[in-house]
Amino acid sequence: MKALAKIGPRSSADLRAGTLRRRDLEAFDLLLEAVGGSGTVLVTGTDGPARDGAVGLAAAAAAAGTRTALLECELATPALARELGLIAEPGLHEYLRGEAQATQILQPLVLAGPGTARATEPLACVVAGRPTPDGQALLESDAFRHAAARLASGYELVVVDGPRPARGMGQLEAVAGHADTALACLSSSEARGRYPRRLRRALRGMPPRFAGLVSFE
């Protein structure tokens, strides 16, 4: 299965640090074109690549001047707060349980570097919060539907760091119902063989338009 884009390891590390260089923007140009016009983009795949893909896409969009939110929906094993140096709690988990308000879970990430000259405001981030084993029930709740709708109406682009297929399709299907486009992110070794084709078939059976595969070196 041909990759829509190939992202190098140095770009991933830079983006996790919140620093955008020109090569980062070039690496994600194809992705922004592929999801152009989408209000909500679901990024899934395997742990590292999916997270890097979601962060990179959201950061590149924000750097281009698009009002962008990054939402972590991997509730079982959240890692976005640690990766980006954000506060781990409260997050989406606490909001969906009615333990936190929307203003408490939105965290701004100010991007730096020569590629951010067109950025008009920080990237808005919502981390998952504390880990939970009942993520599917939370993601299928009215509270999540309301949260997804509020983000979609408040931002030009919402990038969702989605649940991983390896932990079951139920959570992924719950989130997919709120997305317009889906991307699958895998390592270069994982992108070879049958797994990408199985993942593509699964995503094509869900509501979002499947934009393609992204390979991380």
Image: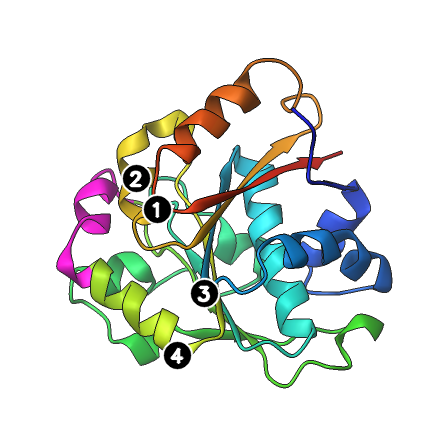
Q: CA distance from mark 3 to mark 1?
A: 13 Å
Within 10 Å of disc 1 (Cα), the crowding (few <14, some 14-19, many 20+) is many
Disc 4: CA contacts within 10 A as few (<14), some (14-19) or many (>=20): few
User: Quick one: label 3 or label 1, which is nearer the N terminus?
Assistant: 3
Q: Are marks 1 and 2 in contact (CB under 8 Å)?
A: yes
Which residues are the magenta region? 132-143
Residue at 78%, 81% (x, y): give it. 117
Q: Is residue 52 left or right of residue 75?
A: right
Disc 3 and disc 2: Cα gap in Å?
18 Å
Sequence-wise, which precedes: disc 4 or disc 1?
4
Between tags 3 and 2, which lies in front?
Answer: 3
Percent position (x, y) of residue 185?
59, 38
* Distance Cα–Cα, label 3 vs label 4: 10 Å
Q: Which residue is mark 4?
A: 154
Q: Is residue 196 positioned above or below 68 on the image?
A: above
Scheme of colours in the image: rainbow
Q: Is residue 176 a member of the stretch shown in magenta?
A: no
Q: How far is the residue under mark 1 from the one under mark 2?
A: 5 Å
> Disc 1 designates what residue?
176
Where residue 173 is drawn, which disc sits there? 2
Q: Secondary structure at mark 3?
A: loop
Task: Identify the amino acid type marked 3.
Answer: Gly
Determine crowd level at label 2: few under 14, some 14-19, many 20+ residues with C-alpha closer than 10 A: many
- Residue placed most toward the observer, 207 or 119: 207
Element assignment for label 4: helix
Disc marking residue 39: 3
